[in-house]
Each structure stands twice: as C-alpha cells, then as structure tokens.
Image (cartoon, rainbow, N blue to C red):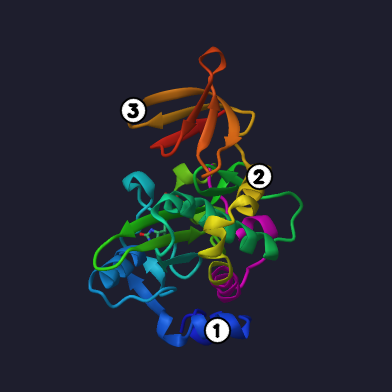
C-alpha cells in the first residue's frame, strides 16, 4: 500500500485547514496518465471543488511545460495536481504560478536541513545549486467555472542514477541533498496547508511572494536568453515586476518586461 493516504497527509494539518481539505478532496492513484489531466477532466465535468487534489505514484503521460514529458520512478517523488477556484479579479491570475512557487518552495525549505537556499528560476522552477528540484505547470479552465489546476512534480526520494542519463547533471532530489528519505505525506500536507493558508489572499497581498522570489532568483544579475513567442530577448536578469513578470536589462535598449516565455537560459 502507498504511504500517501488522506490520514497520513492530513496528520499535521491544523483544524482549520482540515475543515477545508476533507477526505473527499483527496484522491490517491497508484498510476494514471497525468494527474493534471484527471483534475482538468473533473473540473470540465462540473464536479470539482476548491482544493481537490489528485496524487499518483506513477504517471504514464506526465506533462511538463512546453509539452515536455515529466519523468519519475514509481512511488519515489511527489506527482500531484491541486484545483484552485479562480474567484479573484482576472488581472491577478498571472500571479498564480509565482504564488505556487512560493508555497512549494516554502514547504520544501521547512524540511530541508542542508546549508544554502533553494533557487527560484522564473517563472516557476525550483532549483538547488542550479539543478532542478521541482517543476510547476499551471493550467486554467473557464467553463463551467473558472479554476486553475496547479500540477507539481517534486523530486523527493528518487536517486540520481534513476534519472535518464540526460537529466542526471541537471536535476536533483531532496534525497540527494539530505542523503536520507523524506516523508512524501508530510511534505504533501505542508504544501496543501500552504495553499489553503495563502490562496487566494496572497494573490492580492503579493509583496511577500515577490520578496521571497527576489531573494532566491537565480536569474537576477545573470546573462540570460529568453525565448518568447515574439522573439528572443538577451540581457541581464533585473528582478521581477509587480505581477511577477521578468524584467530584463537590455543595456542600451532599456528594460523589458516579459510576462511569459517558452524557455529561459542563463549563464
Ligand atoms: C515543468 O517543469 O515543466 C512542470 C512539470 C509539472 C509536472 C507535474 S507532475 C504532476 C502534474 N501532472 C502532470 O502531468 N504534470 C504535473
């Protein structure tokens, strides 16, 4: 039986979070195509509730951003998606990926004992020593009701040699940092708690999210190349704007603010 049960995930939740995140909100699957696809389908069928969560031990069609695949061995990492009802003004929705990075990153930092900080790579990857520890994919559905699905892949207990060869140099896991296994249930409970406590209030009180990201931004002060649908932008990472947009210092061409990008490379 999997370690991921409602009881184990909710064990450390406060009473007020437990009231919002009851057993009906939790679904564990041994395997599935993609937890995000499952949750998107539930939303489209009109049966989803705020904070519904689907977690799987194994995904056969795990999706990353830009249509990349998301790979993980069975039962090792956290692969889950959480539904957030979109009730705040539409102008604030672009802040959600950054809020998700803050919630996930704060939860991971609460269990890390190693020296050093996580790094946030705009728009919403978490790195440690420049290796990817987690990825976030935010998708929205408008009908029958506006919802966001935040899909999270967090590398927890996988060993470096379990990654495909091409990922070994660019990905890491909490196990590789701590040299011991972490409780997936406890981590998931921390993350659920983070969303329940920060969403939607921190979409409007966004300053703390921005401060958290700024301190950890791996792109700030670095030479970067940002591939957008309108072309490639080169410059120096110059922090974040009020909505979490990436500011690039293009030298003589001035500052450019970027809301979304296909890919960001840094040196
Ligand atoms: C990225 O960095 O490209 C985002 C990766 C997101 C992967 C997670 S795993 C759980 C959820 N289900 C999916 O199919 N994708 C997300």
Q: Nearer the viewer, mark 3 or mark 2?
A: 3
Q: Secondary structure at mark 3?
A: loop
Residues tagged 3 and 2 counted as in contact (Cβ below 8 A): no
Vertical arrangement, residue 163 with respect to residue 232, above or below: below
Q: Earlier in the sequence, mark 3 or mark 1?
A: 1
| Residue 179 visible from this viewpoint | no
Of pointers 2 and 1, the one earlier in the residue sequence: 1
When asked about the image quadrant of residue 108, the answer is: bottom right
The stretch of residues the image draws in magenta is 170-193
- Residue 113 falls inside the magenta stretch: no
Q: Position of residue 250 (x, y in %)?
A: 53, 19
Q: Quadrant of the C terminus?
A: top right
Name the residue carrying label 1: 18
- The x, y position of residue 263, in whole percent, is 42, 36
Q: Residues within 10 Å of mark 3 (few under 14, many from 20)?
A: few
Which residue is at a point 46% across and 52% down the rendered structure image? 92
Helix, strand or loop at label 2? It is helix
The answer to which of 135 and 205 lies nearer the viewer is: 205
- Where is ligand 1, by quadrant? bottom left
Decide which of 157, 218 is in the foreground and name it. 218
Residue with the mark numbered 2: 216
């Amino acid at each position: 039986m999997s370690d991921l049960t409602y009881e184990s995930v909710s064990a450390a939740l406060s009473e007020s979070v437990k009231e919002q995140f009851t057993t009906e909100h939790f679904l564990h699957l041994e395997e599935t195509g993609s937890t995000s696809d499952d949750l998107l389908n539930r939303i489209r069928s009109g049966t989803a509730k705020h904070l519904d969560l689907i977690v799987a031990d194994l995904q056969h069609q795990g999706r990353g951003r830009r249509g990349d695949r998301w790979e993980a061995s069975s039962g090792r990492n956290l692969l889950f998606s959480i539904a957030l009802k979109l009730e705040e003004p539409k102008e604030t929705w672009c802040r959600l990926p950054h809020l998700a990075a803050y919630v996930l990153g704060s939860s991971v930092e609460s269990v890390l004992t190693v020296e050093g900080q996580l790094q946030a790579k705009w728009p919403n990857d978490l790195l440690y020593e420049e290796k990817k520890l987690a990825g976030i994919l935010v998708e929205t559905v408008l009908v029958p009701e506006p919802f966001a699905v935040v899909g999270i892949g967090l590398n927890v207990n996988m060993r470096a040699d379990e990654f495909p060869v091409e990922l070994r140099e660019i990905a890491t896991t909490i196990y590789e940092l701590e040299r011991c296994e972490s409780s997936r249930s406890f981590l998931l409970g921390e993350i659920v708690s983070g969303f329940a406590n920060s969403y939607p209030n921190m979409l409007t009180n966004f300053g703390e999210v921005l401060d958290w990201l700024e301190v950890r931004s791996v792109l700030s002060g670095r030479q970067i190349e940002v591939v957008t649908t309108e072309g490639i932008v080169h410059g120096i990472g110059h922090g974040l704007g009020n909505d979490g947009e990436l500011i690039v210092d293009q030298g003589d061409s001035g500052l450019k603010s970027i809301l979304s990008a296909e890919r960001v490379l840094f040196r």
